[in-house]
């Protein structure tokens, strides 16, 4: 069985591709099969999320490229940026994994969320598309850099991770 445990930035020689839905790309320990039928085990650092086009290398030097599988999703658009921001707020308030695109949001299909978003005035389009949600401010791979290919790629945390955080409530005395 091929074991992949080293994430690399670049390779001129990719020996295979591994197509995975987002749910499987969140796992730091995974056993699956390449398209050619070869079994593969993935061992990455806890908290690692594999992104579309990430490269993993085996001990024997073979490189496998991760491909984000097309999944049943909703593409959310609105008449104004303000309305789209309201939708993003309500999705975030429900801790919904959300992909942020240029003028749209994308989530996994969920009938309850669809109804809520339509109530906010959003247009919901069912689609089958690769799903690349935001990692979050404290995720292991947040932050964005644009590479000119129309997609944003995650690299490093968006915000410093606080050692201790005091939550202030209105009922706290001054």
Image (tube, rainbow, N blue to C red):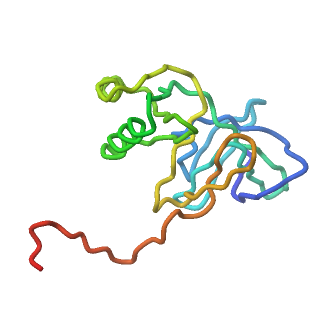
State the residue in front, 117 or 17.
Answer: 117
The residue furthest right is: 12
User: What residue appears at the point 39 percent right and 77 percent down from the top-left corner?
Assistant: 163
Vertical side of 69 occupied by 48: above or below: below
Where residue 151 sits in the image (x, y, percent)? 66, 42
- Give the tally of numbered discs: 0
User: What residue appears at the point 49 percent right and 36 percent down from the top-left corner?
Assistant: 105
Picture quarter with the N terminus = top right
The residue furthest bottom is: 174
Vertical side of 77 occupied by 59: above or below: below
Vertical side of 18 occupied by 46: above or below: below
Where residue 6 sits in the image (x, y, percent)? 72, 59
Picture quarter with the C terminus = bottom left
User: What residue appears at the point 75 percent right and 36 percent down from the top-left corner?
Assistant: 38
Where residue 11 sits in the image (x, y, percent)? 85, 53
Vertical side of 131 occupied by 168: above or below: below
Q: Quadrant of the rendered structure where residue 43 is?
A: bottom right
Where residue 78 sits in the image (x, y, percent)? 44, 29
User: What residue appears at the point 66 percent right and 47 percent down from the top-left corner?
Assistant: 41
């Amino acid at each position: 069985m091929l074991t992949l445990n080293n994430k690399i930035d670049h390779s001129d020689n990719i020996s295979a591709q591994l197509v995975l839905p987002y749910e499987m790309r969140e796992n730091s320990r995974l056993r699956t099969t390449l398209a050619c039928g070869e079994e593969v085990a993935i061992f990455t650092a806890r908290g690692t999320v594999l992104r579309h086009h990430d490269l993993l290398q085996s001990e024997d030097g073979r490189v496998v490229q991760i491909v984000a599988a097309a999944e049943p999703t909703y593409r959310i658009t609105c008449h104004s940026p303000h309305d789209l921001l309201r939708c993003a707020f309500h999705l975030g308030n429900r801790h919904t994994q959300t992909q942020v695109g240029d003028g749209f949001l994308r989530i996994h299909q969920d009938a309850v969320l669809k109804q809520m978003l339509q109530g906010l005035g959003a247009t919901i389009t069912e689609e089958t598309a690769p799903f690349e949600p935001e990692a979050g401010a404290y995720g292991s791979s947040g932050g964005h850099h644009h590479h000119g290919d129309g997609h944003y790629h995650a690299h490093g945390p968006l915000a410093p991770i606080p050692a201790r955080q005091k939550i202030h409530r209105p009922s706290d005395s001054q």
